[in-house]
Image (tube, rainbow, N blue to C red):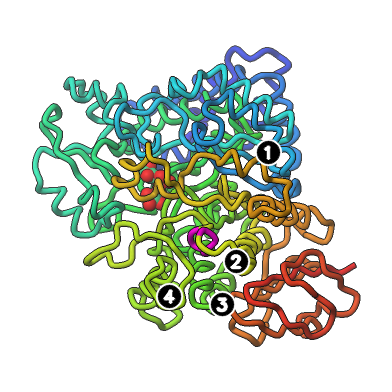
Amino acid sequence: MDVSLLSRACDRFLAGADVARQSEAMIRFDRHGTQLLQRLSRLYGRQPGFEPWLLSLFTTLGTFARARSNELRELDRRREQNPDWFIDDKRVGYCAYVDRFGSDLNGVAERVGYLESLGIGYLHLLPFLRARSGDSDGGFAVASFDEVEPALGSMDDLERLAARLRKGRISLCADLVLNHVADQHEWAVAAMRGDQHYRAYFHLFPDRRLPDRYEQTVAQIFPQTAPGNFSYVDALQSWVWTTFYPYQWDLNYAHPPVFASIASALLQLANRGVEVFRLDSAPFLWKREGTSCMNQPEVHQILGALRAMIDLVAPGVLLKAEAIVASTELLPYLGVGEALGRECHLAYHSGLMAASWVALSEGRTELLQQLLDSTPALPAHTGWMTYVRCHDDIVWGVLRSDVETAGTDFIQRIGAAAAFLEGRRPGSFGHGTAFQSAGSNAVHGTNGMTSALVGLDSVAGDDALRRLALMYGLAFVAGTVPLLYMGDELAQSGNEAEQDAALIALDGRWLQRPRLDLARLKQQSDADTLAGKAHAVIKALIAARRDPAFAARAAAKTLASDNDAVLAIRRGERLVAAFNFSGRPQHVDWNRLNAGDGWTTLLQTADDASTGVELLPAWAMVWRKKT
Ligand code: OTU
């Protein structure tokens, strides 16, 4: 460690702070400055001009730190004192598109009362920054980090919304699309003008020589609609790396200004009141020939640097990894096994999500159990974001190694599960739709709202409703922050809007991106309606998590249920839950699960849950607590 550089960085960070703020900033620098400097030195230390670049970055960080409002600074202090705040609060998340939930940011603010009544403590709004015109991958092709999409409002609206949410103890989560920007972003436009500084923001190749070599080992995200990972752009006279759609240009994080630009984008939003960042497409940030160009060690340096930066400037903020990768690759995003230090606070447990759908389609829980059993304990102050559905497809590839560890064939087994959920197997109840699955990508992804996948859209019967409750019930028992996907709490069906037909035809993920069904919203308290019933299920789950028997900091552990159809989970010392993933009644012996005498039922979707041996109806679940 270059001590002189560290002390100059510290001077830059503290310059301009008044006496009152200096001591706090100094303490934070002492704790996190070295970590940040180390990470950045490893990434960029050998590049010419590293020192001046680094010092100017620390000047910028100091400016952002001083610009934080008193209210946010207070939040920073409280959360610094209790880094388990988001775990202990037992927050439940809600995820929605701004336009589909409330028309615009002000409309979302008007729906905060609804979220409060539901018991939500975390609101993830899908991308709302200015996106490219035309197709924008649902806003994931960002044209400006400094502006809100005009149709959705302004930065001031965002700030007001964040403050309104905070008043209701709801943390606002925003996407930070790390991997790419739109071809209409000013960096891309400058690159097309021939500006060398901005050309270096991207991965450009004069011919197919290198792209062809990379393509040998890099997978495809949209093999049918956006095959390959490179697009030729005339104005650049080059091939540009485009992992996703051709209009999404991957950023080159080997170029230090890219890191500084993204860091500023993050802190600017944090100072507007965004409390959680969903780090979109985090695994893709570093390219290395001969590899999948995912999850490279440098990715963890970059995320670790962002984390150190947050700890230094805005410690009330959380980072959430969106890394849809195999469980073993996922753990480093939470700092597991990373001797290097802290990384994200939260990560999506996409393997658990996908495995729960496999369990539902097979009526067996062995893969789910194996996955839970192989999930190690997490570092302190980190947790799992658990969910049933999101705005994307169910990405089956995350299960490949788990399925193979189980000694089964991936294509055969997952192909059968997907076919079941997509209604292509005898006896299947699902109505999902295959995504990008054909030829060599025979099982890529599956689309559909939860209601479609559990069969609620066709048979509004109790069985289907129990399946919805079962899937959410598992996410609620297993996770640190369980996430509800907008509309699921009203058992809303898939997107059939006429005006979205073209979008759906282009990208089937729009099937699970409907507008909030206002008729169902009105039925939320009407127990005679399907919407009302689903709403009651979700409210009951939120209430059950709040019970003191639910140990937020404890990890979910499986219990031997002696019955492959039933998954049994213990969370802490006082909570045991059993889930019947099959379409037949199954026996559960509560005494064997050590949840018999002295225990009572906390929540159930079975009609009768007496103690002792019990018959759990098809797809039912029971949560029991020690009194
Ligand atoms: C993420 O997706 C977003 O959630 C998608 O909505 C975007 O299209 C994408 O990034 C590009 O911004 O690989 O780890 O269907 O789950 O693309 C990042 C596949 C991703 C998505 C996948 C995911």
Tell me the number on the disc at residue 19.
none
Q: CA distance from mark 2 to mark 4?
A: 23 Å
299 displayed left or right of 581: left
Residue drawn at 39 percent across, 49 percent down: 509
Label located before the other in sequence (4 or 1): 1
Tell me the number on the disc at residue 467.
2
Q: Is residue 34 above or below residue 164?
A: below
Q: Amino acid at mark 2?
A: Arg
Region in magenta: 452-457
Q: Nearer the viewer, residue 372 or 578?
A: 578
Q: Does any atom of ligand 1 lie closer than 8 Å to the CB of label 4? A: no
Q: Secondary structure at mark 3?
A: loop
| Residue ID for mark 3 | 365
Residue drawn at 61 percent across, 34 percent down: 172
Label located before the other in sequence (3 or 1): 1
Instruction: Place residue 549 in its image quadrant.
Output: bottom right
Label located before the other in sequence (1 or 2): 1
Principal secondary structure, stretch drawn in magenta: loop
Q: Does residue 8 show up?
A: no
Q: Amino acid at mark 4?
A: Val
Q: Is residue 93 above or below residue 40?
A: below
Q: CA distance from mark 3 to mark 1?
A: 33 Å
| Residue ID for mark 4 | 403
User: Was residue 181 drawn as part of the magenta stretch in this picture?
Assistant: no
Q: Position of residue 484 (x, y in %)?
A: 60, 49
Q: CA distance from mark 2 to mark 3?
A: 14 Å
Residue drawn at 78 percent across, 53 percent down: 543
| Residue ID for mark 1 | 115
Q: CA distance from mark 1 to mark 2?
A: 24 Å
Q: Is residue 611 above or below residue 514?
A: below
Q: Amino acid at mark 1?
A: Leu
- Foreground tag (3 vs 1): 1
